[in-house]
Image (cartoon, rainbow, N blue to C red):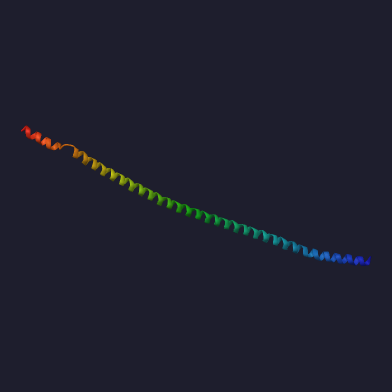
Amino acid sequence: MITSMRKLKEALRHVLREDSDTPIRVTKLKQEIEELKLQKKIELQEIEHMVKIEREKNKMDVDKKELSLKNEYKDKEMSLQSDYYDKSIKLIQDGHKDMQKMYSEIMKRLPDVNMSIKQHDINKT
C-alpha cells in the first residue's frame, strides 16, 4: 500500500505539473488559433484581390478584343461603301455615255429643224 501511495503521490505531482502548464498551453493554443484565423482572413483577402485583378484583366482583354473587332468592322464597312460608291459612279457614267450616244443617234436621224424654220422665215418675207 505504501508503494501504491508513493505511486499515487507521484502521479498526483505529475498531473499537478501538467495542470500548472495547462493554463499556459491553453493561452498559447488560443493565441495560435487567433493567429491562424488572422492568417486565414488575410489569405482570403489576398485571394479575393487576386480574383478581382484577374476579372479586371479579363474585362480589359474582352474590351480590347471588342475594340479590335469594331475597328475591323469599320474597315470592312468603309471598303464596302467605297466599292459601292465606285460601282455607282461607274454605272452613272456608263448611263450618261449611253444616253449621250442615244441622243446623238436620235439627232442624226431627225431632220434639221432649225434649218427648216429659217427657210420658212425667209419664205415669209
Q: Where residue 39 sits: x, y (%)? A: 65, 60
Q: Residue at x 70, y 62 (%)?
A: 32
Q: Where residue 49 sits: x, y (%)? A: 57, 57
Find residue 3 and report its image quarter. bottom right
Q: Residue at x 23, y 42 (%)?
A: 101
Taking the view exactly as shown, the residue that stands out farthest to the front is: 109
Q: Residue at x 53, y 55 (%)?
A: 58
Quadrant assignment for the N terminus: bottom right
Q: Residue at x 21, y 38 (%)?
A: 106
Q: Viewer-proximal residue, 114 or 20? A: 114
Q: Viewer-proximal residue, 33 or 113? A: 113
Q: Is residue 108 left or right of residue 39?
A: left
Q: Is residue 21 left or right of residue 46?
A: right
Quadrant assignment for the C terminus: top left
Taking the view exactly as shown, the residue that stands out farthest to the right is: 1
Q: Where residue 94 sits: x, y (%)? A: 28, 45
Q: Where residue 85 sits: x, y (%)? A: 34, 47
Taking the view exactly as shown, the residue that stands out farthest to the left is: 125
Q: Is residue 109 left or right of residue 47?
A: left
Find residue 21 and report its image quarter. bottom right
